[in-house]
Image: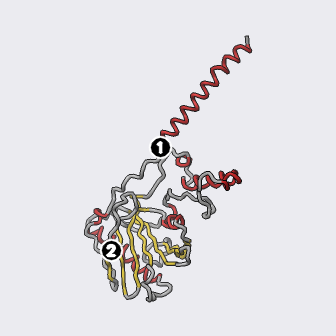
Amino acid sequence: MGDARKAGWKTIAVPALLLVSAFLALLWEVSSRYSARPFSPFTLDASRFAGFDPAIPGWTVKAVQVPTNRPEEPNILAFEVVRGGRCALVRLVHGYNMPMCMKIKEYDVALVSDRRVSASTRISAQVWRVTSSIGDSSIWITSLLRAGDCAVTEDDIRSLPFPRIGTPDDPRWKPEGLTWKSLRHPVSELRARVRARWNSSRADVLTFLRLRQPAWASEELLTLVSCALPPPDGQDNGEDWSAELMEIHAGFARSLRQWKEAAGEVRGAP
C-alpha cells in the first residue's frame, strides 16, 4: 500500500514540477523582455536652460549643437571655449559615471586630483587624465550639480550608476558567442560571461537576472564636464593647462548658479 502511494505521488509530483518550472521560465522570459525595453527619454532637456548664456572673462564661449536624435543619451548643453590656440569643450549632461563610460570606450582614466573636500579650492571637482589607446591624453574635470538649483555637490562621480558596462575584469575579453575557443575552454568562458553580466548589473541581483531595467543616468544630479581639446594641426596649446581648464570649469559652475538665482530657482544655501 505504501509503495503504491509513493508511486502515485511520484506520478503527480514530476509533471507538477515540470509545470511549475515551465511557468517560472515563462514568467522570467516575459519579465526580462519587459525590463529590456529601450530607455525612456529624459524629461530634463535643453529647453529647461533656455536663455543660459555663460561668459568666461578672457575666453570666447560658443554654444555647440547637441545631437537630438538620441533622446536617451545624457546630453543637455555643450559649449566650446577658445583663447589663442587653446580650446576646451564644456558639457552639462544628466548625471552619469564619466570614468566608467570612458573605460568602456577603451580609454585609460586616472584620477589626478580629488578636490571635492578641499577648502582651498573654489569649486568641488575631480580632475582626470584620459588617455586613448594610441597614447593621446587630455585633462578632464567633473563636478556633480543638483538639478534643481545647479549647486555644486561633493558627491563622487564614480558613485553614479552606469549600466552599459558589459566587460569583465579583463577588458581585453569580448563576447563572441559560441566559438571553437569557447568550446575548448568552457569553464573560463562561462566565468567571464557571468562576471561581465554581474559587472553590467552593478552587483544588483534583479538586474543580473534581467528582471529590472538597469539604472541609466540621473535627473536629480547633473554632471558638468570640462575637457581640453587637442590643438589644430601645426599648433601647440601646451602640454598641460589644467589650471586654466579649472578656471573655465569653475566659471561655468558659477554662471549656472547665478543664472538659477536670477530665475528665482534657488531655495536655501547649497
Q: Is residue 194 visible?
A: no
Secondary structure of residue under mark 2: helix
Quadrant into which the N terminus falls: top right
Tell me residue 127's x, y (percent): 50, 75
**Res. 25 image quadrant:** top right
Q: Is residue 94 visible?
A: yes
Secondary structure of residue under mark 1: helix
Quadrant into which the C terminus falls: bottom left
- Residue at 40% x, 79% y is 88
Between residues 203 and 213, which one lies in front from this camera angle?
213
23 with respect to 251 (left or right): right
Query: Of label 2 and label 1, which has the lower sequence position?
Result: 1
154 vs 22: above or below: below
Tell me residue 105's x, y (percent): 52, 66
Quickly name the residue at label 2: 255
Type of amino acid under label 2: Ser
Tell me residue 29's x, y (percent): 51, 40
Give me the C-alpha separation between circle 2 and circle 1: 44 Å
Kindly identify which numbered label has been placed on residue 33: 1
1 with respect to 110 (left or right): right
Type of amino acid under label 1: Arg
Tell which tag, 2 or 1, sits nearer the viewer: 1
